[in-house]
Amino acid sequence: MKNIEKLREIISDAGRIFYADSIDQKYLSDTLGRKRGSASALVFVKSTEETSKVLKFAYENNIPVTPRGAGTNLVGSTVPHNDAIIIDFSQMNHILEVDKENFTALVEPGVILQDFQKFVEAMGLFYPPDPGEKLASIGGNISTNAGGMRAVKYGVTRDYVMGLELVLADGTVLEVGSKNRKDTTGLDLKNIVIGSEGTLAVITKCLLKLVGKPECSKSLLICFDSLKSGIEAVPEILRANLNPTALEFIERKVVSLGEKFLNLNWPDTESKAYLLLTFDGEENEIVSSIIKLESVVKKSAKKVIVLEDSELSGNVWKIRGCLVKAVEAVSEQEPLDIVVPISQVAEFVNYVNQLEEESKMQMISFGHAGDGNVHLCVVRGDRSEAEWQKELEENLEKLYSQAHKLGGLISGEHGLGVSKREFFFKETAAQNVQLMNAIKSAFDPKQLLNKGISYTI
């Protein structure tokens, strides 16, 4: 590509810049590796200044840009288009400040979630967002507004982002947000960028809100004879105002995949389905919540297992966290993260089970029962490529349409990327899409950042 070699003037270190055919294939896709794009260059930046210069170069030469963090995305948000320049932020991975007085931390976008959480917890602080992929980067979490298992109590990533340093498509650097807990001074530009999947601006610093680390935490399993009875118990638990940190649902057949994948044992093998909960806070408060919970589910549940042993509890959560990877190890699959109103979870899961029976395509469901986020693995099995693509498209159409009828949405936390674009356009009002793209044009007038991703026309 014309002028692309001039990137050497910005990134002189040969080990941090690669061109065209020398780019490792993994950088042309996401963690699943099935959707691939094309790139003219891959650049590993180390500073805001470098990022600004690369973006200014791309802007002046009309070259598309694809921002990339840890590459754990599941919907193709990191797939480059039209020979883009990939800007990789994995080397911008420093925790710059922890302000204990204001309960904030300033980090670079390449910081890995689990590393950051361990770091602040050692200081007696707590960063609640807890998506299943702990090796994701903070910048990636912000770009997709990642949710996770603790969202039912603590909220999602958006609720813990207080400020951002951004670089616009033309290289302009700006700061949005601050350490202040209240702000009505104009439009909240920070919140517009959160969840935009790299289409509006590139994140170079993240100001995050922290809270005090809970005194203790305890998990438990509620065992049921059917997934239906487990799902139907969720509203009762929520109405009891028990305030669980996490409230997950999972079937025994799915647990088995996780056990085999990690070579770990689940504490019950007889039940058909489970609710997995965690409570955190003061110990007496947790004990009281568990006693009340046992009373609430007494009629519907087979038994309640309190996971007193920390190793066992850790293993159970590891099994829950690996499920998408466990399914992928057995067969190609399409991971979905449909969200419906909490009151509609049972009806939607029932629909999934009916569709599985009718279509003969395996559909493995689990997810965040406490906030209506239903994760699905639609499994290929032994279908030929042609059969798989045809039947998958038909079933996705039905699943997304049913979610829409129930007042739901096609993505709760993975984002739209490439995978969900056509369904997004089908289910979203044209005027909404037009407004989103008008906002993109204000941020990125040449349409260079992650063009062809998410909502972008």
Image (tube, grey):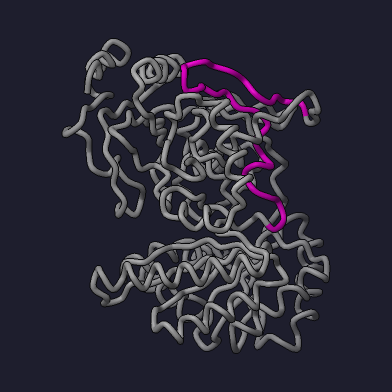
227 up-or-down from 440: above or below: below
Query: Depth check: 96 or 152 in front?
Result: 152
Horizontally, residue 169 falls left or right of residue 120, namely left
Query: Is residue 332 rendered magenta in the image?
Result: no
Query: Depth check: 251 or 245 in front?
Result: 251
Horizontally, residue 35 falls left or right of residue 198, namely left
Which residue does the image show at 81% across and 61% down from the upper left? 285
Could you tell me residue 112's position as x and y percent? 47, 39
Query: Depth check: 433 or 52 in front?
Result: 433
Which quarter of the picture shows residue 339? Answer: bottom right
329 up-or-down from 347: above or below: above
Inspect this view and state whether residue 232 appears. Answer: yes
Could you tell me residue 90's position as x and y percent? 39, 33
Could you tell me residue 91's position as x and y percent? 39, 28
Horizontally, residue 262 falls left or right of residue 177, namely left
Q: Which residue occupies the extreme left position in the image?
A: 21
Residue bounds of the magenta highlight: 152-180
Which quarter of the picture shows residue 93? Answer: top left
Quarter of the figure with the N terminus:
top left
244 up-or-down from 259: above or below: above
Horizontally, residue 50 falls left or right of residue 415, namely left
